[in-house]
Structures are given as structure tokens and as C-alpha cells.
Amino acid sequence: MKILLRYLFISLLKAFVFCLFACLLIRFIVDLFGSVDEFIQNRDRFSLVVQYYEALFPGMLLLLLPIALLFATLYTLLDMNRTSQLVAMQACGVHIGTIFIPFLTLGVLCTGVLYFLTLGPGAAAQARQNEIMAEMRSKPGTTGLYHAQVFRNHEARRTWYLETLSVADGTASGVDVCEQDETGHDLREVFAHDAVWTGDSWNFSDAMVETFDDQGNVATRQIYDHFPAPDWNDVPAEMVQVVHKPDEMGMAELRQALAQPGQAPVLVSQYQTQFYYLFVYPWSALVLLLFALPQGLQYGRRHVGAGVFNAIFLLLAFYCVWFFFIAMGQGGRLPALASVLIPMGAFAAAGVLQILPLLGIRIPLRLPGVAVN
């Protein structure tokens, strides 16, 4: 039995490596054709191209691991069906459940890898790609220069609006800073033509400072050639952290975003949905595997094409339904947790119901008011 299981696992692993490599190669070629113009124009910064594909790789694995597992499982079982190996195994008394062990083992391993990627480098891979591509498109000498930046210091209740901010020089222009109290009323606002970061505080030039009374009216207004703010220690590198889209954020960023008070309900829905998405999506490898196993066993040598077609149809249906429910959760039409659990749970239940008859387990269906003899 150990020899048989080892043979099944090695056969599956070979098919899985081939399918994964083929999927990665196709994804790489598609991305290369879409980005080749950028790479040619930035030939002097080849290191950025290497960094771009280093950032692309985790995201590709997240998407392609379940797909590769589905087709590898289907190929292995259909090939064994075609050569009558499965018939011979069952004729020798090998239970279907035993044949499933290597496939489920690889499915669990893939789920573990997906969890590592979603909780680690894979979640923020898209954001890193966008940052590197933006750096490629930037003109030499403008790296680290940011436009139209908004930064909120929640602890100090201070909001910055900056036309431009240079992290390298620690300078800013077109500055508007507003301080508020704990109730959200404005206390002081500083308008400045320029600002310089001195290493531990900000110094403003050509500044106008307004203070407000309890009714929100301007109490005082003063003009300064130079206005130091020794207690304002907002570091430029922290102020330019780009506000990523929810699908570009990792676990740490999502937790931080959800912990911030005063978020708009639509943003909260997006953050919560993405947060649960990262926890539930890795199970897609096992869910797709549950569908591939009966497909590979049921279609014999005369129906290989039908098995492949059904697998492709299943793959498209799964991702269409999955992303539809994700969109419903992000839009606030469904609770965030339900938007990820409903599609994954429904497909998992459907897959289990297909496998149970193969294992000799039948679930009796009884209709209300109908007697079953």
C-alpha cells in the first residue's frame, strides 16, 4: 500500500509541477507583453525589472496554485483511467478513499502555502508592483517626489494637505495643516508656501496661522515669514505611505485601517471583506480539488474531453461566483463574513456531495410529508 500511495503521489506531483510551471509561464508572457514598452524605456534601470517580477511572483502563485492543482488532479486521474490503472487498483481491493489520500495531502500542502502567501508577501504584492511600475515611469531625479498627499495623524488629531512632498529633501510646498480637538472642531490651521523637515520638527515659511473659537469662527490670523512647529514630529517617510486599495493591502494594513475611527461605512465594508477574503481564499485549493476528484474518476477513456471541458467550466463558474459575492460584500450589500463564506461553503458542500457516493456513502433525501419505505 505504501508503494501504491507513493506512486500516486509522485504521478500527481509531476503533473502538478508541470501545470504550475505552464500557468506561471503563460502569466509571465502575458504580463511581459503588457509591460515590455516600460522595460525598454527604462533599460538603464534593469534592477527595477527584476524587483517588479519578484513582486509579481507571489501574486501569481496565489491565483495559479488552485488552478494548477485542479488540472494536475484531473490529468492524473484521467490518464490512469485511460490506461485502466484505476480499474486494476479497485479490482485488487484498493478503496477509493485510499486513492484520494495523495491528492488530499497535496491539497492540504497547497492550502498551507496559500495561507503563507496571503498572510505574508502575497497580499501586498499588487501594491508593490504598482509602486515599482510608478518608479519606472518617473523621470530620473524625481524619485521620492509625491503630489497631492493627504496625511492624518490620528493621535495628534492633525491633518496635512500637501501639493508636493519630497521625502529625499524633506521639503514640501502648498501646505495646509489643520489641528482639531477630540470632538472634531478645528483649533488651528496653518497655510504655508513651503515647509522644511529639520529632522525632528517642521519649519514653515510664508505662513498664515489661524485660530478658531468654540463656534468655529476665526479668532486670530497672523502672518509669519518663518513659523516653527517644534511639537509637530510627523516624519515625511511616514506621511507618504500610499493609501492602497483594499485588495492591495496585507493583514497588518487591514487591521490598522479597521482600527482607525471615523471610517466611511463603504470603506469599512471593503476592508472587512478583504480581511476575511485573505483567511478564506486559501481553501479554494481544496474546494477545487473536491470537484476534480469525481470528474477524473467518472469520465473514462472515451470522455476525456468532457472531463476537461467540465473542469474549465467549473473553474470559470467558481471564480465568477466568488468575485461576485466579494463585490457584494465590498459594496455593503452582504455582511463581509457572509460574502466569503457563502460561495466557498456552497462549492465545498457541492464537491463533498459528489464525492460521498464514490465512497459508498449515500445521504437519503426526505421531503416533508412524504413517507419513505
Image (spheres, rainbow, N blue to C red):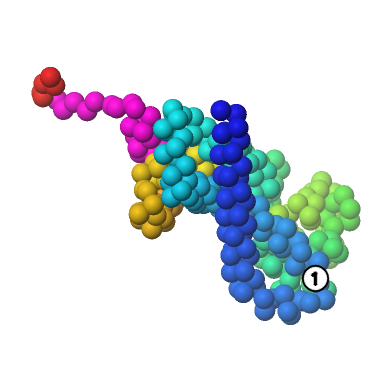
Q: Residue 201: in sight, yes or no?
A: yes
Q: Is residue 157 visible?
A: no
**How many marks are shown on the rendered structure?**
1
Judged left or right of residue 137, residue 279 is left
156 horizontally vs 3: left or right: right
Please report the residue visible at 62 percent of the width from the left and 74 percent of the height from the top: 33
Region rendered in magenta: 347-368
Residue at left offset 61%, top offset 42% = 10
Residue 250: where, in percent of width, then height?
Answer: 63, 46
Q: Between 274 and 243, which is closer to the camera in this rendering?
A: 274
Single out the residue that lies furthest toward the right.
Answer: 199
Q: Which residue is mark 1?
A: 46
Residue 254 in the image: state x and y as whole percent: 60, 43
* Quarter that holds the N terminus: top right
Residue 357, magenta (yes or no): yes
Mark 1, other Cα within 10 Å: few <14 / some 14–19 / many ≥20: few
Q: Residue at x 83, y 55 (%)?
A: 202
Element type where label 1 sits in the image: helix
Quarter of the image where one finds residue 263: top right
At 36% across and 44% down in the image, what residue appears? 298
Residue 288 higher or lower than 60, as above or below? above
Query: Above or below — where is 33 with respect to 73?
Result: below
Q: Nearer the viewer, residue 312 or 13?
A: 13
Residue 352 among magenta residues: yes
Whole-percent x, y for residue 170 in the image: 84, 61
Q: Position of residue 324 (x, y in %)?
A: 40, 52
The three-letter code of the residue at mark 1 reads: Phe
